[in-house]
Amino acid sequence: MNLSRETLLSLYFHMLRIRKVELRIESLYPLDEMRTPIHLCIGQEAVAVGVCGVLRKDDLISSNHRGHGHYLAKGGNLQAMIAELYCRETGCSKGRGGSMHLIDTSVGYLGSSSIVGGCIPIGVGLGLAIKMQKQDRISVTFFGDGAADQGVLYESVNFAALKRLPVIFVYENNQYSVCSHVSARQAGDILFHGMSPELIRSFRADGNSLLEVYDTAREAAERARAGHGPSFIECQTYRVRGHAGSGPDTALGYRKADEVAAWEAKCPVIRFRDKLLADRAITEEGLVDMEQKIEAEIDEAFRLARQSPLPREEDLALYLFRE
């Protein structure tokens, strides 16, 4: 790839921003002011940024319960996201959705679903709508290895292949569904890797390598825009923190500390930072300036969230579907 210095620094900025937002959420969550379950994506930032980095603003994505990174990488409003975690009226879902139900239609983030696998058919439906309306857009759906066990994935991939829809399935294989390792749930390679590329183009990528994810996603996006149908990308990555909440979870006994440490040594943020420094794309001083800019933005987002009003009691029934 021949990416400009500006593009490389932008990709790193967004990945570092997601990491710092997640760390701030984690540090403040024990205060119990964010009255919503959280599922952090620490360690998985390269997947969100690498994929969304090749998308246009009007391309559409659907996401899952671990969606903070997808939301921010697609251009979602940070202040609105933090306000949503505090259940405030200024939140992106008006304080009614919480961490697992983010949305920002202005940037093509069509929402996240707390149902495991629930976002997959939504992403296919978006792809169908794009094709029926003859639009020059694509749909991307992000899901984890727990969702890869669900029958709805196979139904959705079959339909997308049958109709040659402009859909990219991004399988974030972070190794665990809650406390269950992927090897305990899947007998071998996911079958889409063996399908004919005429039906669906299958890729594997190092999910901790930002540039590998970016390059793979770019090829899949080009295929979709050219009318060649869906692609399936498996990104091998790792969920560094526990399934939900904040802090490490090795005390639960389902994985060992040395396994976590081995994956932390493959940190996508540090790997890409070191590459930028080695290639002289940025200096240590430039990194400090970038970090300070991000920290200031996060400070302001949390300040505004805490100062924003809660939904009024008389408005709690708003936005509910009624026949």
Image (cartoon, helix red, strand yellow):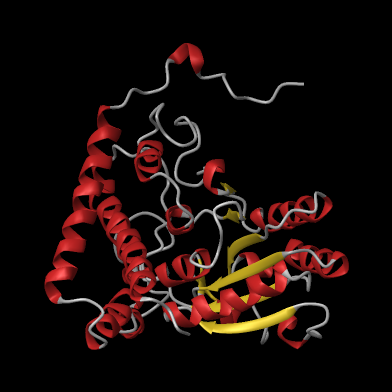
Task: Determine the image quadrant of residue 201.
Answer: bottom right
Question: Residue at 71% of width from left, 67% of height from top?
Answer: 225
171 lies left or right of 285: right
Q: Residue 211 at what x, y percent from top left?
A: 44, 80
- Seen as rendered, the residue at the extreme top is 314
Taking depth in this image into account, of 79 and 263 the one nearest to the observer is 79
The answer to whether 181 is drawn above or below residue 68 in the figure is: below
Does any portion of residue 185 appear in the rendered image? no
Q: Residue 158 at what x, y percent from top left?
A: 83, 69
Q: Residue 312 at what x, y percent from top left?
A: 42, 16
- Seen as rendered, the residue at the extreme left is 285
16 lies left or right of 139: left
Question: Residue at 54% of width from left, 53% of height from top?
Answer: 57
The answer to whether 289 is drawn above or below residue 76 in the figure is: below
The answer to whether 187 is drawn above or below residue 252 in the figure is: below
Q: For the C terminus, give its image quadrant.
A: top right
Taking depth in this image into account, of 131 and 153 the one nearest to the observer is 131
- Seen as rendered, the residue at the extreme right is 162
Q: Residue 71 at what x, y percent from top left?
A: 47, 52
Question: Residue at 58% of width from left, 63% of height from top?
Answer: 142
Q: How many dots with numbers? A: 0
Does any portion of residue 31 appear in the rendered image? yes
Task: Determine the image quadrant of residue 289.
Answer: bottom left
181 lies left or right of 18: right
Task: Determine the image quadrant of residue 303.
Answer: top left
